Image: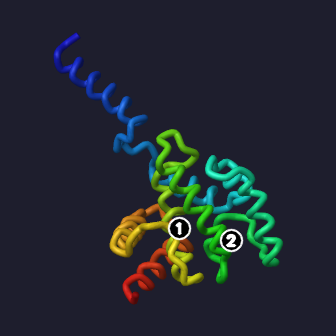
């Protein structure tokens, strides 16, 4: 084996090892991220929040909260685009997205988990006048700008983040 071939193979192996260790190699193409995000936004909240290790039966709590407030919220998109969403559910989405972002083998690519994470925080501030999480406004603005740079972000979510950024800049 030539020295050049050995270097190339070593570099490839190092990149593969980094993937499970918080490496920054991009795994998903834009069209794949768009599909995953679209699928996640259409997914039933109850199912995904039940997978949270933080509190068992959160999915059942989602259903009970929606029923108690006579809300028709079935998906992540329903909640994030609702004019008066329950703060408890936004906090659950924030926790779910944070757990997905922190787990290198999580259910969602970090970019899609970030969409949910920032969206939940922004919606809580814009529509519920409540701050959830400890992310400061500067970090929230920077993260929102980063999300707006994603070409794969669909128009409804892009509109939500643009509205959120305007809201933050007015505050």
Counting from the top left corner in percent of width and height, residue 94 is at 55, 62
Left of 31 or right of it: where is 89? right
The quadrant of the rendering that contains the N terminus is top left
Residue plotted at (54% across, 56% down): 97
Q: Observer-nearest residue: 164 or 149?
A: 164
Tell me where residue 43 sits by quadrant: bottom right
Sequence-wise, which precedes: disc 2 or disc 1? 2
Say few, some or many: other residues with alpha carbon within 10 Å of mark 2 (under 14 / 14 to 19 / 20 or more). some
The residue at which mark 1 appears reads as 154
| Location of the C terminus (image quadrant) | bottom left
Q: In the image, which is nearer the foreground, mark 2 or mark 1?
A: 2
| Nearest to the observer: residue 142 or residue 2 | 142
Q: What residue is at 79 percent from the left and 78 percent from the top?
A: 69
Q: Which residue is mark 2?
A: 78
In the orientation shown, which residue stands out farthest toward the bottom? 170
Look at the numbered disc 1 and give the secondary structure of its residue. Answer: loop
Q: Is residue 25 above or below residue 86?
A: above
Report if the CB atoms under discs 2 and 1 are less than 8 Å apart: no
Return the x and y of residue 116 as percentages of the image width and height.
Answer: 54, 62
The crowding category of the residue bearing disc 1, from other C-alpha atoms within 10 Å (few below 14, some 14 to 19, many at least 20), is some
Q: Who's the residue at 33% across and 33% down the image?
A: 15
> Can residue 150 be seen from the camera position used here?
yes
Q: CA distance from mark 2 to mark 1?
A: 15 Å
Whole-percent x, y for residue 169 in the image:
37, 85
Identify the coloring: rainbow
Position of residue 49 in the picture relative to residue 137 (left or right): right
Task: Left or right? Give the position of 73 relative to 168.
Answer: right
Q: Quadrant of residue 127?
A: bottom right
One can see residue 32 in this view: no
Which secondary structure, mark 2?
Answer: helix
Q: Residue at x 31, y 28 (%)?
A: 14
């Amino acid at each position: 084996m030539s020295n050049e071939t050995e270097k190339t193979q070593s570099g490839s192996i190092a990149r593969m090892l980094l993937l499970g260790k918080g490496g920054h190699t991009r795994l998903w193409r834009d069209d794949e991220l768009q599909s995953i995000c679209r699928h996640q936004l259409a997914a039933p909240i109850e199912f995904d929040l039940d997978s949270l290790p933080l509190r068992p039966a959160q999915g059942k709590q989602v259903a009970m909260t929606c029923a108690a407030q006579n809300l028709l919220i079935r998906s992540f998109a329903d909640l994030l685009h609702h004019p008066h969403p329950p703060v408890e559910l936004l906090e659950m989405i924030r926790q779910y997205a944070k757990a997905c972002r922190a787990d290198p083998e999580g259910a969602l690519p970090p970019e899609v988990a970030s969409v949910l994470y920032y969206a939940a925080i922004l919606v809580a501030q814009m529509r519920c006048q409540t701050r959830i999480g400890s992310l400061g406004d500067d970090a929230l603005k920077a993260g929102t700008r980063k999300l707006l740079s994603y070409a794969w972000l669909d128009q409804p979510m892009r509109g939500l983040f643009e509205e959120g950024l305007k809201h933050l800049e007015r505050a």
